[in-house]
Amino acid sequence: MSDLAIKISGLSKRYRIGIREKFPTIRETLMHAASAPLHKVRHWMSGQNSSTGSEWIWALSDVDFEVKQGEVIGIIGRNGAGKTTLLKVLSGITEPTAGYADIYGRVGSLLEVGTGFHMELTGRENIFMNGAILGMRRQEIKNKFDEIVAFSEIERFLDTPVKRYSSGMYVRLAFAVAAHLEPEILIVDEVLSVGDIRFQKKCLGKMQDISHGQGRTVLFVSHNMDSIQRLCSHCIILEQGKLIAKGDTASTIQQYASTNSFQSSPGEWIDVSRVSHTGTSEARFVKVQYSSLNEDTGFQPYSNGPLEFLLVIMSDSQRSIGSIATTLYNLSGAKLVNADSISLGRLITLRKGLNRVRLRIEKLYLNPGIYRVGLWLAANSSTEFDHVQSAFEIEVVNFESQIQRLGMRPICDGVVTCKFELLEVT
């Protein structure tokens, strides 16, 4: 018996852009049929292409890979790389243009908030309807009903139409249904970012239990490399609809990060507006500058020395920010330093337009090497304005004149404490 859960061969999906879909009347259809020969002659004589104003794009192009039963596969890539299109094809939401995907087992999908739910039905009714869509018998749904409700934390609103739910309540219920109705294959897109931090951790814990404890197959799309590392045994990278790499999680993430960030120089302005972002974008990072404030190192960051960031942020309106952070990762994606203003207990105010925020890490407890910088901006733990997982790379150098050096990496779980100060908001 085969141990395959998914087999994908030559999978391609093409979309036409540039034309708005329109449903013609009977009169318009008859007139178009009558005038079609004349239009063709005119286009031929004028040398115009009948498809002017539209073009075709390949969201997926000749994708091949296999997933074994019980594997947890991370799917990573830039925005628009084809990740969600792939999941929609595998979930049966859209048909491929070419190629095929063989699915061996029942599929549960959580692609975007609202998928498979009816807005006019209550939470209770949607649990039973969604379970039926997944192929569950009514008795099976009843057996899992209490667990689903307890996990979603919406007991008080169970008999309220879901159109009145907040986005957080909606995604909690949607994830609870998909995770508890025991499909053999669970497909999850980047919807968990809608929930608050506590619920995201709860979902990640449930997914770890599903994959490792229950041996079910999971396909997981995320821009959060930390979550990918914790959950996935293998990864694939999509770029412009093509599969460009697949392999173990650590090496694949390192390859992805190295092609999606660049090594920078201290003192220069780094444009971060075009790298991959998540969040509402109501306030967002535009450019960044950094320096060690030490001319003897060419302002390059060094072990046990200071590191200052000047962050330029565009805000759509005046707003309060409870959490602004710069984060340093190693090339495998492990979080090492997280200088987050939420730990200072200080709110800052952004005015409409461009703002400059200066943030300084007083002592950088990192050994010499290449590190990746991430950026974070949020009103609080549940409202994410902007998150750049991999903005650029910096090099930490060995400054020999330092009397004391750290000498070795800490053996804790990728977390390095640092003392820092939020200096300026202008």
Image: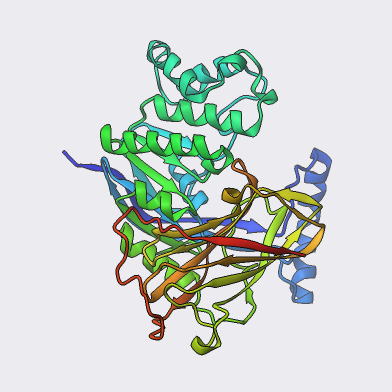
The answer to whether residue 19 is left or right of residue 3 is right
Who's the residue at 28% across and 45% down the image? 71
Q: Is residue 146 visible?
A: yes
Residue 76: x and y, percent? 44, 57
The answer to whether residue 383 is left or right of residue 241 is right
State the residue in front, 11 or 298. Answer: 298
Instruction: Please say which color scheme the image uses.
Output: rainbow
Marks counted in the figure total: 0
Who's the residue at 46% across and 36% down the image? 109
Residue 87: x and y, percent? 46, 46
The answer to whether residue 154 is left or right of residue 322 is left
Looking at this view, name the residue that lies furthest to the front: 403
Who's the residue at 35% across and 48% down the image? 230
Q: Is residue 16 above or below residue 106?
A: below
Q: Is residue 99 visible?
A: no
**The N terminus: image quadrant:** top left
**The C terminus: image quadrant:** bottom right
Residue 48: x and y, percent? 75, 73
The answer to whether residue 426 is left or right of residue 208 is right
Q: Is residue 187 above or below residue 75?
A: above
State the residue in front, 58 or 258. Answer: 258
State the residue in front, 172 or 92. Answer: 172
Looking at this view, name the residue that lies furthest to the left: 1
Q: Is residue 216 above or below residue 350?
A: above
Who's the residue at 69% across and 54% down the image? 281
Q: Is residue 21 above or below residue 137?
A: below
Residue 242: x and y, percent? 44, 63
The picture quadrant where one finds residue 335 is bottom left
The picture quadrant where one finds residue 294 is bottom right
